[in-house]
Image (cartoon, helix red, strand yellow):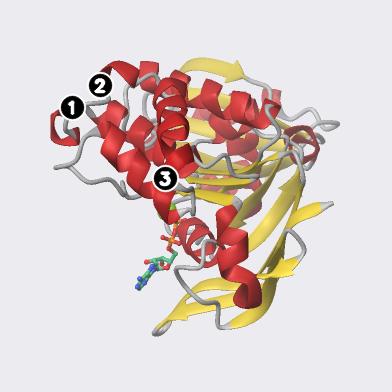
Amino acid sequence: MKVVAVNNIYKSFGDNIALNNLSLGIEEGEIFGLLGPNGAGKSTTINILSGLLNQDKGDISIFNKNIRMHLNEIKQNMGVVPQDLAIFEELTAYENISFFASLYGIQAKERNKKTIEALAFVGLEEKAKEKVKSFSGGMKRRLNIACGIAHKPRLIIMDEPTIGIDPQSRNHILNSIKVLNQKGASIIYTTHYMEEAEALCDRMAIIDKGCVIASGTAESLRDIISDKNTVFIGLRDISKVDESILLNIKGVEDIYFKDGVLQVVSKKEVICLDKVIAYLAEAGASIMDVKTKSPNLEDVFLNLTGRSLRD
Ligand SMILES: Nc1ncnc2c1ncn2[C@@H]1O[C@H](COP(=O)(O)OP(=O)(O)O)[C@@H](O)[C@H]1O
Ligand SMILES: [Mg+2]
């Protein structure tokens, strides 16, 4: 069963088209990644799914119910962890979670138990009575998560939960997501870190400029570029390189320059590296090193858009 079905949605802010015919389907029980560079439209999608914004066009159902018609009912089974921290600095960790649990409709008699469970889940039980303003960034992120999951939702939506935190908190968060999923929650996980999505998500959609440019498992996405080879050539003097000459070498499909490294994408079946190297040597670009690596989702994005994810 699909827990979330997003059909052809559009959203503009003035002249800025944030979502441009975006469609997604999330199956019950999966961790689904929403992947894309800053400004791709991830948070806008999440804000529409959680009822904070309305789409201009298109329809969305969650748990097979239209969100415009059944938002309150849907919300009780959905937990949202927003990108911008939504916690109160002057309240304690306990008070924050308890407050959000009440917003999600948890009755007073159950709230204490659920709050304590959520505190323990994110490893903050010892900090229950401390005000949030004394917390580190990672602790605040963890509390932000606890606030979104204390009511044990069937669907959890997390918007870049690991942004700007220390590696330890990050690992804690990534493991927590796996545990929540093992306990049965479906999860939408938003990130611009490709390696996180690769490690965590069953399936994902790569979004760019408000629409889905590719979707599937990490493996199926990597297959998009499986007939290609990428070689990284470190050069001392990149200014000596004439792009058009390289692009004219048979088998060379594309080239990119980044941080003094020339990236050459070629067809797997055509051997062209010897010609590339010969040209670079002749041009006096001084080859420092040559590396190959197996393609990752970052390369898929680069291949589909011509841009790097983090630029
Ligand atoms: N409230 C808003 N007002 C105006 N523009 C917005 C607003 N929210 C988002 N946008 C614009 O919509 C686009 C998508 O933004 P967003 O969904 O936040 O991207 P992401 O979360 O993938 O970084 C961007 O161009 C952003 O500037
Ligand atoms: Mg965002």
C-alpha gap between disc 1 and disc 3: 21 Å
On the rendered structure, is 82 left or right of 198? left
Query: In the rendered image, which residue does mark 2 sit on?
Result: 127
**Which numbered disc flags the more N-terminal residue, 3 or 2?**
3
Query: In the rendered image, which residue does mark 1 sit on?
Result: 130
**Which residue is pictured at 73% across the width and 68% down the height?**
65
**Which numbered disc flags the more N-terminal residue, 1 or 3?**
3
**Figure quadrant of residue 295:** top right
**Which residue is pictured at 19% across the width and 34% down the height?**
132
Q: Are marks 1 and 2 in contact (CB under 8 Å)?
A: yes
Compared with 263, 308 (above or below) is below
Query: In the rendered image, which residue does mark 3 sit on?
Result: 108
**Which residue is pictured at 68% across the width and 28% down the height?**
183
Outermost residue to the front: 109
Q: Nearer the viewer, residue 24 or 2?
A: 2
Q: Nearer the viewer, residue 160 or 1?
A: 1
C-alpha gap between disc 3 and disc 2: 22 Å
Residue 272 position within the rendered picture, expressed as x and y whole percent measured from the top left:
73, 30
Q: Are marks 3 and 2 in contact (CB under 8 Å)?
A: no
C-alpha gap between disc 1 and disc 2: 5 Å
- Category of crowding for the residue at label 3, using alpha-carbon neighbours closer than 10 angstroms: few (below 14), some (14–19), many (at least 20): few
Count of marks, rendered view: 3
Compared with 68, 300 (above or below) is above
Residue 56 position within the rendered picture, expressed as x and y whole percent measured from the top left:
55, 83
